[in-house]
Amino acid sequence: MDDLNYASFSGDGSKVYDPFEVWDHCNGLILLQDSQVNCMVVNPATRQWAHLPPRPPPLCAGPPEYLYANDYLVYDPTVSPHYEVFSIPRFTYQNLDPAVEELEWPPSPCVLHVFSSKTGRWEERSFAREGATVAGTITDMRTDSSLGHRHAVYWQGSLYVQCQTDFIMRCTVNSGKYQLIQPPAAFEPSDWTDDSRARRISIGKSKSGVYSVLINKSHISVWILDDSDGQIKWVSRQLIGHLPKLQDESYFQLESHGHWMLHGIDPRWDSES
């Protein structure tokens, strides 16, 4: 990694600042991404950073313009000094060829692009599905065409990714296998209409493991993922307290991690600052 410096330079030597956004984080590393889908991994503790090479197009059926991908960090300094970035494909709302629409998603094996800091390049990695659970078809995935970034967490050697229609894909990094986990609250296509935009489900990580949070207007529900007996199940957790009363358009701005606080957010970008 190079020394931390958020500015790049143009051909005439002038500084060019790209509006990078925090896209993911894992055990002290931060993944940033700009509007051109350029990625950078930052270590705030050592003030070092590294630009990733351009990500190849998603490895799945369908025209590239109907596909995009979300990137997620995998890093455990107790195991290795190197990190990886997993690219998980997603589908836009456009109709594809009928033969493509009925394809199972995710397939088995599922081939993903994974960047390795050890090799410095993107590689194709195949994951075979464990269990009989099937998330659905590509048509089903397109019913959830929301463009918002989905959360992922890395826990005990596995990457848990919240995918379209809210199912969770658990990739065991070293085994080349994945499992599908249904969300604790079922996804409905109507969840993304204007009338119900206050409903939001996401995943996170705590000292107890992987959890899921459902925000539905003024109600909040929390579940912990439990597979201690070999069976994957969600265990409900009771919360003390409640959400503050907000205007409907404010619910979707709330985060599901940490303490609840209200802040005024100015969405305007001030180019003069």
Image (cartoon, grey):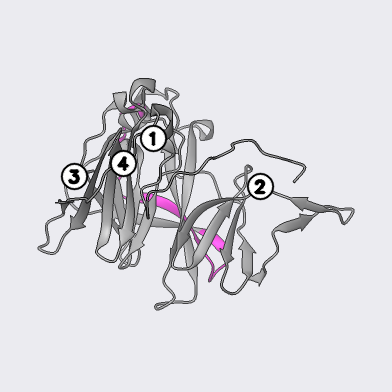
Is the residue under label 4 in contact with that under label 3 (CB below 8 Å)? Answer: no
Residue type at tag 2 = Pro
- Label 1 to label 2, Cα distance in Å? 25 Å
Looking at the image, is mark 1 or mark 3 nearer the viewer? 1
N-terminal of the pair, mark 3 or mark 4, is 3
Kindly report the distance in space between the C-alpha atoms of the residues bearing marks 3 and 2. Answer: 40 Å
Over which residues does the magenta segment extend?
A: 101-122
**Discs 3/2, front:** 2
User: Callout 1, which amino acid?
Assistant: Tyr
Crowd class of label 2 (few under 14; some 14 to 19; many from 20; radius 10 Å):
few
Q: Position of residue 89 (x, y in %)?
A: 43, 43
23 is within the stretch colored magenta: no
- Which residue is located at x 62 percent, y 56 percent? 53
Tell me the residue that label 2 is attached to.
19
Kind of residue sitting beneath label 3: Thr
* 111 inside magenta stretch: yes
N-term-proximal mark, 4 vs 2: 2
Q: In the image, residue 76 lies at what x, y percent?
A: 41, 71
The disc, 4 or 1, on the residue closer to the chain's N-terminal end is 4
Label whose residue precedes the other's in the sequence (1 or 2)? 2
Residue tagged by mark 3?
133
For residue 251, the mark is 1
